[in-house]
Amino acid sequence: MPSNAEAAGIFRGIADLLDVMGEQFKPEAYRRAARSIDSLTEDRAAFAARGELRSIPGVGDAIEEKLKEYLATGKIGYYDRLQKEVPAGVAEMLRIPGLGPKTARRFWVELGIEGPAELLSALDAGRLVGVKGFGEKKIAQIRAAVDASRTTAPGARMPIEEAYPIAQALARGLREGAGAERVEVAGSFRRGRETVGDLDILVTSDDPTRAFDVFSALPEVKEVRLRGGTKETVLLQNGLQVDLRVVEPASFGAALVYFTGSKDHNVQIRSLAKDRGLRVNEYGVLRGEERIAGRTEEEVYTALGLAWIPPELREARGEVEAAARGPLPPLVGESDLRGDLHVHLPPDADASTVDRLVTVGRDRGLSYLGVVVGGVDSRGVPFSLSESARQRMRAASTAKLRLFSVQEIDLPWMVARSPDPAGADWYVLRPTSRSPTPPPSAPVLERVALLAHRAGSGSSSDESLPAWAALARSAGASVEVGPGSERLDSNGARQAREAGLSLAVPTGVAERANSPTGPVALQFVRRAGALPVEVRNADGHAPFSGGRKGGRG
DNA sequence: GCCGTTTTCGGCCCGACTGTTTTCAGTCG
């Protein structure tokens, strides 16, 4: 079955080839369609079946025809024809940073260079020397970029939970060292995308040079790529690229909107502004030369006649139209969380671990915690919380913060042995590698609060999800959303939500203070558009709290 | 190639940065 990602990939390939051929607007049109198809939560085929391909933003007559052709034959003739016109290597040269379609075309047409390898030998042979527009620096720059692109995978994206501590450290370094009043990490990081390609950091400072100096000297930074009056680009030790921009306070909101994106969201609000005789850029909303908004994001959206839109929703999926109609319903937020259904303590947890958990839980304003007291670990080995920790759970559970015991069950294990009914207040079902999809006759237990379902590795269509959804529904269980291999990503969460399932968010309450789990999980459910009422641990009641006393071990 | 509460044709975001330039082209985000 051809996937959305494959179709999007072909359209990107078409865009690259058209770029090299010197087309003006078609490449962007194909890329826009590709982005749109990539972000679909429903398989494209389902749209085709209902004749709704045209409802996908960026898909018109021509691209609809090509999608239909792809669905029917698995190929797109137009792409095949283009590939015959342009050598594959010419489009490959676009992957080299700093080398765009104009240059690739010139190399190909004027110098007969048909790919990165030939480019390298041309450089070695000195064939670029004396060519108009190619000075000494430019040639050195191209060589460095070609060399770098052979060793590092271009376009590699980093999981957001991996980027999170790095972003926190950079922001902290800027706050402490550069005296920046406001520091905000924008880009896809702020939108809570599963992966980030780079980081965009915005700061306010009246001394940009000092901010750049401080930033370049942070231990995470490997080298400075470029530095101008308002912007610096660096490469981190781990290969991640980070852009730092210094903006004045009167423009901070506009810059935040601009650099948070997404690209398609920005395009949409710009065209909206144009309709109203306004202009939006990273400095503000302008009527003629007069800046009418820019200090805060709210100001910017209001000036455009829009309600403020949470960053997680800024993907040009209808959020602009909704914000034009009025305020958006508030998405689930940190302050809505009442408890955690699924808290893991470390293997050596004792009474003092429980005490620390209680302190953090109280500080976070939570009113219940379901602590895992036993189950099977990822290797299939049974584990059990120590007796001293269990005793402290019973003692420390209060009306204000109740502690519940949770038993984890993985599916084959559950089929083989029924769990001790007295052992837990509720259960968490965990799939294992041995049970990718539940059997139709999977037994249904009582008091299953949570299904920790493996995410479809970031793909937008997860074929096993319907089976898991059916199991969750029949068990009355919620599905866990968040980073990691046993939780749904935001696409999965959106699908689950559209299927009417309730969601659950880990709080990261038992993890170290700057752990990404809680904040990233919250971003994922928000990207799925979840309201507090759709999130089980945000609805004010502990699951099954009426029937049993907490703290049984 | 897409799109439209002014348009079915004529637009298509726009500013920063770099390098090779004497006023700009290319790339990037």
Image (spheres, coloured by chain):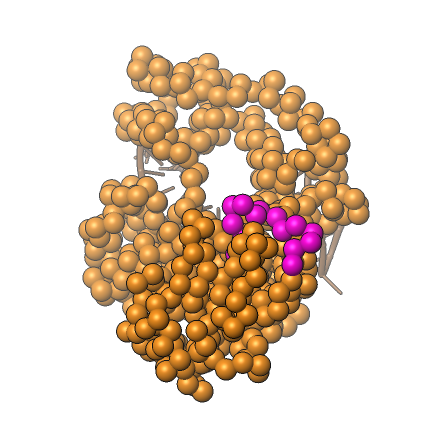
Give percent across and percent down for residue A419.
54, 64
Q: Is residue A550 above or below residue A217?
A: below
**Chain brown in the figure, letter:** B
**Chain orange in the figure, letter:** A
* Quarter of the image that includes the N terminus of chain A: top right
Residue A436 falls inside the magenta stretch: yes
State which region is magenta: A430-443
Q: Residue at x 57, y 48 (%)?
A: A435
The overriding secondary structure of the stretch rendered in magenta is: loop
Q: Residue at x 45, y 50 (%)?
A: A380
In this figure, what is the number of numbered marks? 0
The reply, left or right, for residue A239 in relation to residue A474 is: left
Task: Quadrant for residue A275, please give it.
Answer: bottom right
Q: Is residue A370 above or below residue A228?
A: below
Q: For this rendering, which residue is in front, A144 or A247?
A: A144
Q: Residue at x 48, y 51 (%)?
A: A485
Residue A135 falls inside the magenta stretch: no
Task: Quadrant for residue A142, please give it.
Answer: top left
Q: Is residue A430 above or below residue A368?
A: above
The reply, left or right, for residue A321 in relation to residue A373 is: right
Q: Residue at x 57, y 61 (%)?
A: A418
